[in-house]
Amino acid sequence: QVQLVEFGGDSVQAGGSLRLSCAASGITYNNHYMGWFRQAPGKEREGVAAIYTVDTAFGRTYYADSVKGRFTISQDGATNALNLQMNRLKPEDTAMYYCAATPLLLYDSTWSDLDQYKYWGQGTQVTVSS
């Protein structure tokens, strides 16, 4: 049984940083795409970043334009955790953040498509105040 559990959400002021992590069980990272999504109140869930790691030499990452240069997605080989380092946070980053995984092959045009992901966590709340 696959289980994804996110943690690390918190309330911070604009300009601050947070690190989200996702602990996964029941899947192996090296044959799944892993992604972070977020959903703000009244808005649709949107892709934030995704990663596919076969090994460090062939890692592939994708980012939403709104977070490029501020957020970094990574996988920790030692702990088997999926991380999202979020810097220079803005009030518009406020949302519930979800970890997701899929065994499907993703591309630039599909990595942020919710329908591509098979497994989802319950989410962790990030609130950024101005």
Image (cartoon, grey):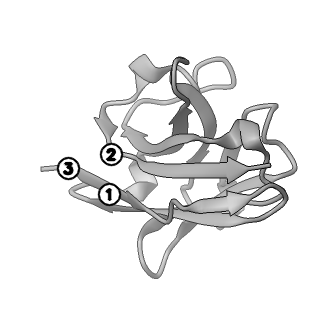
Image height of 102 relative to 15, above or below: above
Q: Can residue 62 be seen in this view?
A: no
Dot in front, 2 or 3: 2
SS at badge 2: loop
| Residue kind at label 2, given as amino acid type | Gly
Q: Could you give the CA–CA distance between mark 3 and mark 1, rounded to whole angstroms?
A: 10 Å
Dot in front, 3 or 1: 1
Q: Where is residue 31 in the image (x, y as percent from the top left)?
A: 40, 48
SS at badge 1: strand
| Residue kind at label 3, given as amino acid type | Val
Residue tagged 1: 5
Q: Nearer the viewer, residue 22 or 123?
A: 123
Q: Is residue 75 visible?
A: yes
Tell me what residue is drawn at x 62 percent, y 26 percent: 107
Whether the residues at callouts 1 and 2 have beta carbons within 8 Å, the answer is: yes
SS at badge 3: loop
Q: Where is residue 55 in the image (x, y as percent from the top left)?
A: 58, 63
Residue tagged 3: 2
Q: 2 left or right of 103?
A: left
Residue tagged 2: 121
Q: How crowded is mark 1: few (under 14 residues within 10 Å), some or many (20 or more)?
A: some
